[in-house]
Image (cartoon, rainbow, N blue to C red):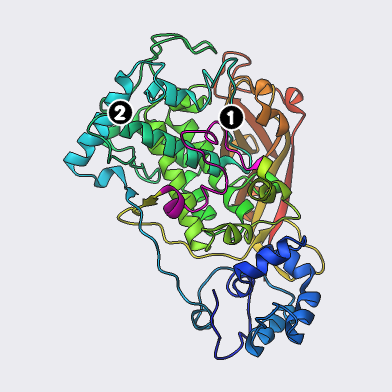
Amino acid sequence: MPSNPSTPVANPTWYSDIRHLFTQDDIDHMRSQGLDLSIYDVVKDNSSIIYGQVASGSMPPGNPWPSDWVETFLNWMTNDCPKGTNAPSLQQARLFKAAAAPVASRIRRDITTLSDGELALVKKAFEGMIAKDPDDPNSFFKQAGIHWLPGTGTPPRFFCQHHAPGYNPWHRAYLVGFENAMRSVPGCDKVTLPYWDITTPLPEVLKLPPFDQYTLPRDIGGGYNKGYVTERFDDATIAAKLVQYDVTADIQRALTKTDWEDFHGYFAGAPYNTIIAAHDGGHVSIGNTMADQNVAAFDPVFFFFHCNWDRLFWKWQKSMQATDLNGLLSTINKTKDPLSYQIFTLPILQKLDPFSTAPLNLNTLSIINSVTSLDVDYEEPRTPTLMAFQTKTLRSSLTSQKFEVQPDLVNVRVQGLNRLKIPGSFSVHLQKDGQTIASKAFFQPNEAEKCENCVENAVVHFDFELPLAEVTGGKLGVWVEPIDKSFVGDRFPNKLMGNPTVEVRLLLSNE
């Protein structure tokens, strides 16, 4: 909650200053009247009305703003309501009080930093889960099967979300359930799930039992039968593919983004070159099992892999002061991305099935604050990635917006690609004069046309942020390579996926 500033902020922005002027009471009061003060577009579009109310002392009722706050808001309006970044400033430090951070009892750590005793406990938990009867809800088989095959319930249902706003919330709930299952093993009631920082080599311990592979104890469908053993690539291949798919760069790019859509990427028209692109590239890089959504979670590395994505989500939330509902909503573009707003504000859309019933009873609201709601926090790697926030990168801009051209960079977008006929995960290679210059991967089930979420998001796009010199002076083309080449070979026919197009645009930076 803001305290009285000594002077007004001369150049305030939404993220650094304005969103913090509204108290919880203010937001609750106006949200009930259809005006959500936690949303940038709402405050910007109604800024004149809001200014009139706060300047006259009419609002907030019984607790009018001091003149310094009013002038700060007017300065923001005068400067065309800049969104800005969350970069701290001396002005911000004077304006806002820092809240004491709560402490969680479940601290998830980099697996390479665990002691021998801690590793032994994680190993014991996995061995115990694997040894349980496949029908036991805490067995490794049952927990892995939640992600896709064999599905949940009779007839089986599939709930996993990937290229949709529920991706991060759903997987956060999934990890809590899996960690609880680890704790069901006798002697493991205090164990926590470590993470693998995918920007570093695959840890040696994950190449040893019980983390190196898993054998299916029964048929699960999709051609995966009892006795199937999960598969991984060798170290050199994994490392090469992570570079090929630009996974580390996508992660670093994501951590510089201030908006929810841009951090995740892909949905609401956001570029596909941040967290979900890194996630997809990571899956496809690790091996045939991890590349297939049908069975990915049966490779034990899946859970260390996904623990890292949740760490990055929480890291971004903390950096953006988005660890409560209002803070998270303040990063969402309600106009362009209404669904992301709705999954946190409409009860019917807040469910995270199958985790919204006992024993977890989790929904999109209860996963927002990992520490206070889930008692989960993360210890950062020994050499954490430090990234500075950047102003929003645009592919186009309204004439009413201030922006500058970034002449040395272009965004190459492959768009209009219908993925439903492609048998499973695939790679998209951007080519210049027949030579591949950049690649992205897309993670999906073998029969995407039977996946509800896939059907709703059938037409996909891919973004390659490249130096202008790399794309000029030649003919650009696209090669779509299925991971499973048994159907059509290594090149999927363009006509079967809607004849995708290639678009090149200069990048614009706002504010």
- Residue type at mark 1: give it: Phe
- Residue type at mark 2: give it: Phe
Residue 172 percent coordinates (x, y): 48, 42
Q: Which residue is mark 1?
A: 159
User: In the drawing, what numbered circle is on residue 217?
Assistant: none
Q: Earlier in the sequence, mark 2 or mark 1?
A: 2
Looking at the magenta stretch, what is its main secondary structure?
loop
Question: Is residue 498 rendered to the left or right of residue 354?
Answer: right
Label 1 Cα crowd, 10 Å radius (few <14 / some 14-19 / many 20+): some
Furthest toward the left, the residue is: 116
Q: In this picture, which residue range is highlighted in magenta?
A: 349-374
Residue that appears at 61% across and 84% down: 9
Question: Hey, which quadrant is residue 234 in on the image?
Answer: top left
408 or 115, nearer to the observer? 115
Q: Which residue is mark 2?
A: 126
Residue 276 percent coordinates (x, y): 56, 42
Label 2 Cα crowd, 10 Å radius (few <14 / some 14-19 / many 20+): many
Q: Are marks 2 and 1 in contact (CB under 8 Å)?
A: no
At mark 2, the secondary structure is helix
Residue that appears at 65% across and 81% down: 63
Residue 408 appears in the figure: yes
Is 404 inside the magenta-drawn segment?
no
Residue 356 percent coordinates (x, y): 55, 36
Question: Hey, which quadrant is residue 449 in on the image?
Answer: top right
475 or 505, nearer to the observer? 505
Question: Is residue 291 rendered to the left or right of residue 41?
Answer: left
Residue that appears at 63% across and 19% down: 447
Is 355 inside the magenta-drawn segment?
yes
Residue 492 appears in the figure: no
In the rendered view of the protein, which quadrant contains the N terminus?
Answer: bottom right
In this rendering, is residue 98 above or below 463? below
Residues at marks 2 and 1, CA–CA distance in whole angstroms? 24 Å
